[in-house]
Amino acid sequence: MNETFTKAMARNMFYGGAVFFFLLFLALTFDTVKNLPKRDHRENITESVVRGKHIWETRNCVGCHTILGEGAYFAPELGNVYKRRGGEFIKAWIAAQPTGIPGRRQMPQFHLNDQELDDIVEFLKWTSEIDTNNWPPNIEG
Amino acid sequence: MQFKSQAVAKPYFIAAIALFVGQILFGLIMGYQYVVGDFLFPYIPFNVARMVHTNLLIVWILFGFMGAAYYLIPEEAETELYSPKLAMLMFWIFLGAGVLTIVGYLAVPYATLAQATGNDLLATMGREFLEQPLPTKIGIVIVALAFLFNLSMTVLKGRKTSISLVLLIGLWGLAIFFLFSFYNPSNLVLDKYFWWWTVHLWVEGVWELILGAMLAFVLIKITGVDREVIEKWLYVIIAMTLITGIIGTGHHYFWIGTPEYWQWFGSVFSALEPIPFFMMTVFAFNMVNRRRREHPNKAATLWALGTGVMAFLGAGVWGFMHTLAPVNFFTHGTQITAAHGHMAFYGAYVMVNLTMISYAMPLLRGRSANSGSAQVMEMWAFWMMTVSIVFITLFLTAAGILQIWLQRMGSNPMSFMDAQDQVMLFYWMREITGFVFFAGLVLYIGSFFYKQNEAPAAA
Ligand code: HEM
Ligand code: HEM
Ligand SMILES: [Fe+2]
């Protein structure tokens, strides 16, 4: 590297760059958080949705599935599954697991009661209504 | 080894490698479940194997970073470690917490584990990479704080070099951004937004500082190039890392409910993220070419050069491939992501740890370098693992492109599961290559025991 560009200049570039871009990031975060209510429809986050998210987490669904494209790639996207399949199908599906078809990927039986099944559906319904800039590309996720 | 207390690094390195073996075994289990879906079901469901695979990865990389810091800081500060006892205590706490957590994943249903460990008091579990029970997360924070205290005290009483400063900033950042793992709002969008403050700001932020400092340290040692030159490179590299990488977080904010403007910020800044990785490659080759001594440890030199190249390929090239919003619209959450995740993690953080271990382990065992034949064996292991990961990445990329084509394009898209059936061939090839990787890892471990009594290799 050039001799006129000293280590002290490099160090200042590091500190200056880090501070400036972190502050910019904070400003953007502030703006994002302010604008989110219009996009996430948080007025629809009911008690049931909250419980549903808790069930989603404590069964580690994200260890096989993606939700809004994040998670594991072993099983279908579930961010839009409510639109793809509807609530009744989702409940019947979860209750019927595992399929036991030899050689096929298996989903565990979680022994959810009716209330818990309703909660997970409510969570997935709310999730499917988030404004995701039209992602995924089609209904298959 | 110049200071007695550097010896605490050794158990950290050994634990790191042992957990690495566990990580790969569970990778192979999952790779097999990808082709024979019901393999080990219901004993080890895929999601459990995945938690074990990714959490072992993170934990062993942290073990590696800690070992590296305990080795590097006393030598840079030219003084004994503040408290070797504290370092050893933290080693056992961290190992204990890690092993218990993995046993917990495997032994009881995840919901039971969550209930038993206080997840109802403060729900933090069940999010990708952050699956650890609350006591483990708290344990990580305690270990990290004790570790940082120990190192900071060492630096304060000794020589303050740019390398140790950068390493410390990186490690402090690691601990601070981990705190976001305790924030889990019931609003999924907010949850995801701040989840990335841990995940992205780790691998494309503060961890790169740690990576840079470790690489710079090893390069000074093996090339003898002037410290001023190396530290100037280090500062420029990490400046570029944060200038591009912080706003680059936006490449995860395209489709999770966040405002549209992130498509611009995320695309533009993350498209520049390959720059620091490219500089790392140039840096490593430049320093080795300008070397002022012939270090007898050829294997460590190979690992250092390999880190530069593979981090650039995995993070830089494979990252760039899917980072522009119009491309990411199609690739988001497919096998393309997995392909990139594998080569980036391996090329950057696995390899920099193995670089450090390759350099420091012989010294910790009382010689400047291993025997020539042991080094040849280690270099074979380097090539087997590295070439395997390249092919694993290529097969997953092929699977990903096909997946997108079948499931996300055209007027008559296939369902997810039908598309998976169509790309089975690539999953088989990935799994077979995984076994080659594992063989490379076994060979790597063998090199620690092979002909150790022969004289060290001459320069
Ligand atoms: C060599 C044998 C390996 C095999 C067969 C293997 C297999 C797998 C599989 C099947 C997944 C889950 C993908 C999914 O969610 O559907 C996975 C995830 C992952 N593995 Fe591996 N793996 C191996 C080695 C490694 C290595 C060496 C690393 C690190 C350097 C690694 C890092 C990761 C990471 C970071 C993820 C999460 C990826 C993401 O979320 O996109 N794996 N692996
Ligand atoms: C060593 C550095 C890096 C590591 C270890 C790494 C690792 C990963 C991992 C594991 C994921 C998957 C996360 C998940 O499971 O959701 C990911 C996602 C991603 N990475 Fe990286 N990465 C690195 C650098 C980069 C760089 C430099 C770029 C851009 C140039 C990049 C672009 C992306 C993008 C766009 C995604 C999202 C993929 C999706 O939409 O599904 N990464 N990275
Ligand atoms: Fe990222």
Image: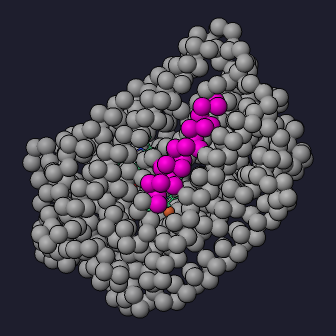
**Residue at x 31% of width, y 76% of height:** A135
On the image, the x and y values in percent for residue B74 come to 81, 39
Is B6 rendered above or below residue A100?
above
B230 or B37, nearer to the observer:
B230
What coloring was used for the rendering? one colour
On the image, the x and y values in percent for residue A20 come to 70, 75
- Is B318 in the magenta? yes
Characterize the magenta stretch by its predominant secondary structure.
helix
Q: Quadrant of residue B35?
A: top left
On the image, the x and y values in percent for residue B377 come to 52, 19
The residue at the far left in this view is A101
- Is B135 in the magenta? no
Can residue B90 be seen in this snapshot? no
**Residue at x 32% of width, y 48% of height:** B396
Is A49 rendered above or below residue A94?
below
**Residue at x 67% of width, y 78% of height:** A23
Q: Which residues are magenta?
A: B300-320
Is B225 rendered above or below residue B153?
above
In-image side of A115 versus A1 (left or right): left
Quarter containing the N terminus of chain B: top right
Q: Quadrant of residue B158?
A: top right
